[in-house]
Amino acid sequence: MSVFATISAFALPMTIAAILIAGIVHKVPLYESFTEGAKEGFTTSVSLIPHLVAMMVAVSVFRASGALQLFIQALSPLLHIIHFPAELVPLALLRPISGSGSLALVTDLFKHAGTDSFLGRVASTMQGSTDTTLYVLTVYYGSVGIRKPRYSVKVGLLSDLVSVFASIWAVSMMFGK
């Protein structure tokens, strides 16, 4: 076992032990503090439910209505010019919204194209290098009541877009097409 694996195996238990020891040293009522924090976590979770339901409904309507397929067909001439595989467009669009939905798309792509295919490798790289930006912002901003996200949505989506194109470029450079 390497040094890093050993440190990783003991990191979480040691952190919990350090928190408990610090609480005892500072005479903090540990159990009461834990239950109070758990109560606040439950309240935060309940307040997030409307935001998450709204986002999931929007994604489902977009896919079920056929709007996603029409969008891909409209973009296909541009996609052909920039050598962007049309099969990856749904993943690029869904990944900032839903992690589990995009994972389902990647799994479906693996079944059709194979894991070691160019599409499978790019999909894997996209899944790992992008984030569920809108989901994360919904959860974090919804939990603290932020209504004006300012630049965070733009920067997050721009970084996802860059990651999508960088994934195609990186896989093309490493494995070819």
Image (tube, grey):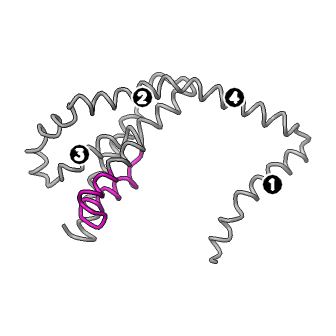
Mark on residue 60?
none
Q: Earlier in the sequence, mark 2 or mark 3?
A: 3
Could you tell whether 130 is left or right of 17 in the image? left
Residue range in magenta is: 106-131
Q: Earlier in the sequence, mark 3 or mark 1?
A: 1
Q: Badge 2 is on which residue?
A: 150
Q: Badge 1 is on which residue?
A: 17
Q: Amino acid at mark 1?
A: Ala
Q: Residue at x 30, y 50 (%)?
A: 162
- Which quadrant holds the N terminus? bottom right
The answer to the question of whether label 2 and label 4 lie on touching residues, with beta carbons closer than 8 A, is no
Q: Badge 3 is on which residue?
A: 89
Separation of residues labelled 3 and 1 (CA atoms):
46 Å
Q: Nearer the viewer, mark 2 or mark 4?
A: 4
- Which quadrant holds the C terminus? bottom left
Asked which quadrant contains residue 174, the reply is: bottom left
Instruction: Tell me if mark 2 has few (under 14), some (14-19) or many (20+) residues whose alpha carbon lies within 10 angstroms of its own.
Output: few
Q: Earlier in the sequence, mark 4 or mark 3?
A: 4
